[in-house]
Amino acid sequence: MSQFDDVSVVKKANVYFDGKCVSHTVQLADGTRKSVGVILPSTLTFKTGAAEIMETVAGSCRYRLAGADWATVVAGELFAVPENSSFDIEVSGEPYHYICHFT
C-alpha cells in the first residue's frame, strides 16, 4: 500500500535525538495508530512500550534488538520489536523512511 486513506494526523511532529528522527502520528479510521517518519544518518537507541513492527519504506538500516545480533533491512522489509524492550538502529548514507505499526 502506498498511502493511508481516511486518517487523522497529529499536526505536531515527534522530534527525537536532536532532530535525527522526526515522525508524525497517524490514526486510522479503525483506531489503529501508526507513526510515519524519517531517521537521518546516526546510531540511536529506542525504547518501546507497545510492541512495534518497523516497515522500511525507503533507504536501509542496521538494527539490533535487545540481546540479539545486528541485522539489516532494506525498502520493502520489516522487523518486529517486542513490547517493553529496546532496539538500536544505525542509518548511514541516505535517510531511512519508515512506518512504525503499533501492535
Image: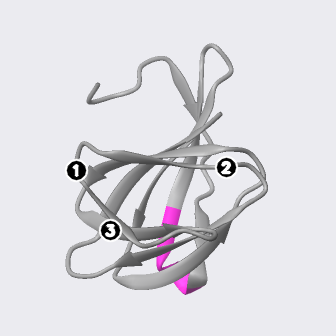
Callout 1: SS: loop
State the mark number for residue 75.
1
Q: Quadrant of residue 50?
A: top right
State the mark number for residue 3.
none
Q: On screen, 97 above or below 69?
A: above
* Viewer-side label of 3, 2: 2
Q: Is residue 41 left or right of residue 69?
A: left
Image point 57% across, 86% down: which residue? 18
User: Is residue 21 rendered magenta in the image?
Assistant: yes
Callout 3: SS: strand
Callout 2: SS: loop
Q: Position of residue 4 (x, y in %)?
A: 40, 26
Residue under circle 3? 61
The residues colored magenta run: 18-22
Q: Residue flagged by tag 3: what amino acid is it?
A: Cys
* Viewer-side label of 2, 1: 2
User: Is residue 1 rendered magenta in the image?
Assistant: no
Instruction: Name, please, the residue furthest toward the front.
Output: 68
Q: Which tag, 3 or 1, sits closer to the chain's start?
A: 3
Q: Which tag, 2 or 1, sits closer to the chain's start?
A: 1
Q: Residue flagged by tag 2: what amino acid is it?
A: Pro
Q: Position of residue 61 (x, y in %)?
A: 32, 68
Q: Which tag, 3 or 2, sits closer to the chain's start?
A: 3
Residue under circle 2? 82
State if disc 2 and disc 3 touch (CB < 8 Å). no
Q: Quick one: 21 or 54, which is closer to the camera?
A: 54
Q: Position of residue 93 (x, y in %)?
A: 20, 81
Image point 41% across, 72% down: which residue? 70
What's the distance in space between the residues labelled 3 and 1, CA to CA? 9 Å
Q: Quadrant of the N terminus?
A: top left
